[in-house]
Every structure is written in structure tokens, then in C-alpha cells.
Image: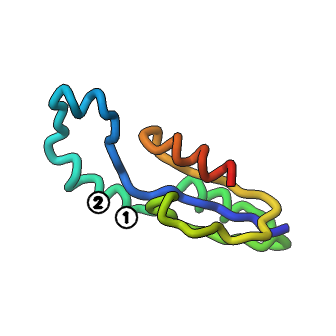
Amino acid sequence: MRIGFIAMSGIRACDAELLQLGLTLPGFVERSRTIASLPSLGLLTLAGVTAGAHEVHYLEVSDVNAMPSLPLGFDLVAISSFSAQIQEGYQLAER
């Protein structure tokens, strides 16, 4: 079985209504770069406990919309995302 573990990296605060109200997140952009550079420990743990008979692929996706296509042929896919990006995660799952 081919299993894809897809980590959606990159932190974005994109609530138009809050941005219109002037919400700013001091230091968030600087911290987001560090956070986005960390691997998804949940997915790596799942990959680590997956039986050796399976073919495992770990992919990091920073921008779902910039991807022309996803690798094909996975029998199973696990997606990890931050809450702020979950809508993009759903879009990815529908592909």
C-alpha cells in the first residue's frame, strides 16, 4: 500500500473581517517562519509506526493553490494542518 503523509506548512492569518478591524499580531510573522519550518511530528510518528511492508511518502505543502497537481497513486493519504488553514486542507482532500 502506498501511503502519503502530507503536512501543510506555512502560517497565515486570513480573516478579512478581523483584518478590516485592524487586528494585528505583533511578532506573529517572525514566529510563523520558525513554526512553519518544523516538521509535522504527528505525521512523522504515524509514518514511524507504519509497518515496513507499506511504501510511505512524506510531503510538505506550503501553498495548496500553487501546486499544479498532487502525486498520484496513493492508496491512503493523511493530511496535517493548522486550524487557520483547515479550509485549504479540505480543498486538498477533495483533489
Q: Which kind of residue does numbered mark 1 sit on?
A: Ser
Query: Quick one: 27 or 92, which is closer to the camera?
Result: 92
In the image, residue 86 sits, relative to residue 3, either above or below, namely above
Identify which residue is drawn at 37% across, 59% down. Answer: 36
- Left or right, residue 52 beside residue 7: right
In the image, residue 20 sits, relative to residue 54, either above or below, namely above
Q: Which kind of residue does numbered mark 2 sit on?
A: Arg
Residue 59 position, x and y percent, is 57, 68
Identify which residue is drawn at 59% across, 62% down. Answer: 44
- Left or right, residue 25 beside residue 92: left
Query: Quick one: 79 or 18, which is closer to the camera?
Result: 18
Q: Which residue is mark 1?
A: 37
Residue 6 position, x and y percent, is 60, 60
Q: Quadrant of the N terminus?
A: bottom right
Q: Quadrant of the C terminus?
A: bottom right
Say whether marks 2 and 1 touch (CB < 8 Å).
yes
Query: Quick one: 22 or 25, which is closer to the camera?
Result: 22
- Left or right, residue 36 beside residue 48: left
**Which numbered marker is on residue 68?**
none
Residue 69 position, x and y percent, is 62, 68
Gap in angstroms between the C-alphas marked 2 and 1 = 6 Å
Q: Which residue is mark 2?
A: 33
| Colour scheme shown | rainbow
Q: Residues within 10 Å of mark 2 (few under 14, many from 20)?
A: few
Residue 17 position, x and y percent, is 29, 27
In terms of secondary structure, where does tag 1 sit?
helix
